[in-house]
Image (cartoon, grey):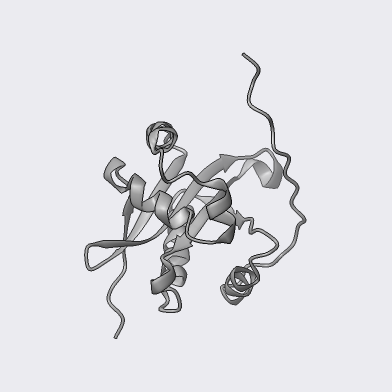
């Protein structure tokens, strides 16, 4: 029997573990800087202070094994409803395949329902084929094409 997964709001003490999970793959290694937590701690303070944001940690045995971030977005479309956006879903590499990600996503869906969301959505990098299969098994449909554009930092 798998050890239970407990979801909870992330605390500032979790930031280093979260950043380690975000950087633990080919894509993350190229964009995360685990040597300087300053920007992550600043971002955490903003996220934690925003009632429409929920940065969460999954624990088993008192150890952080996964993370995700939920953003609750009010829209005029769909009758003025609210939707939940799931981002930065990660499970520690050595913990994958044990159902932790599915339990995390079930929890995210329950949080969205509690907030009255009419829709839950996410994006996934096109190279993450295993993640695409995972989300498909959970009932997520690839209904849209996403576009992103990197913006340079503001000039001084």
Quarter the N terminus occupies: bottom left
- The picture places residue 4, in percent across and down from the top left corner, at 28, 73
Q: Measuring 51% from the left and 53% from the top, which residue is drawn there?
A: 88
Q: Report whether 7 appears left or right of 102.
A: left
Residue 152 is situated, as x and y percent measured from the top left of the image, at 68, 29
Residue drawn at x 41%, y 42% is 35
In the rendering, at what x and y percent does residue 30 appear?
58, 51
Q: Height in image: 33 above or below 49?
A: below
Nearest the camera: 63 or 68?
63
Residue at the far top in the pictured view? 156
The structure residue drawn at horizontal position 45% and vertical position 66%, both measured from the top left corner, is 106
Residue at far front of view:
35
Q: Quadrant of residue 91?
A: bottom left
In the shown orientation, is residue 4 left or right of residue 21? left
Residue 153 placed where, x, y %? 63, 26
Q: Quadrant of residue 76?
A: top right
Choose top left, top right, bottom left or bottom right for residue 140. Answer: bottom right
Question: With 8 as the anchor, is 76 left or right in this view?
Answer: right
Q: Is residue 64 above or below residue 135?
A: above
Give left or right: position of 41 versus 30.
left
Q: Is residue 133 above or below residue 110?
A: below
């Amino acid at each position: 029997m798998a050890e239970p997964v407990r979801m909870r709001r992330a605390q500032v003490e979790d930031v280093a573990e979260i950043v380690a999970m975000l950087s633990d793959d080919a894509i993350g290694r190229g964009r995360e800087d685990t040597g300087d937590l300053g920007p992550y701690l600043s971002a955490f303070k903003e996220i934690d202070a925003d009632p429409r944001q929920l940065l969460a940690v999954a624990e088993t045995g008192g150890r952080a094994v996964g993370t995700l971030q939920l953003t609750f977005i009010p829209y005029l479309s769909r009758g003025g409803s609210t939707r939940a956006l799931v981002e930065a879903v990660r499970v520690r590499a050595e913990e994958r395949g044990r159902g932790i990600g599915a339990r995390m996503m079930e929890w995210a869906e329950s949080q969205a329902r509690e907030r009255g969301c009419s829709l839950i959505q996410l994006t996934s990098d096109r190279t993450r084929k295993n993640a695409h299969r995972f989300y498909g098994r959970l009932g997520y449909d690839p209904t849209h094409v996403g576009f992103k554009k990197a913006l340079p930092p503001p000039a001084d």
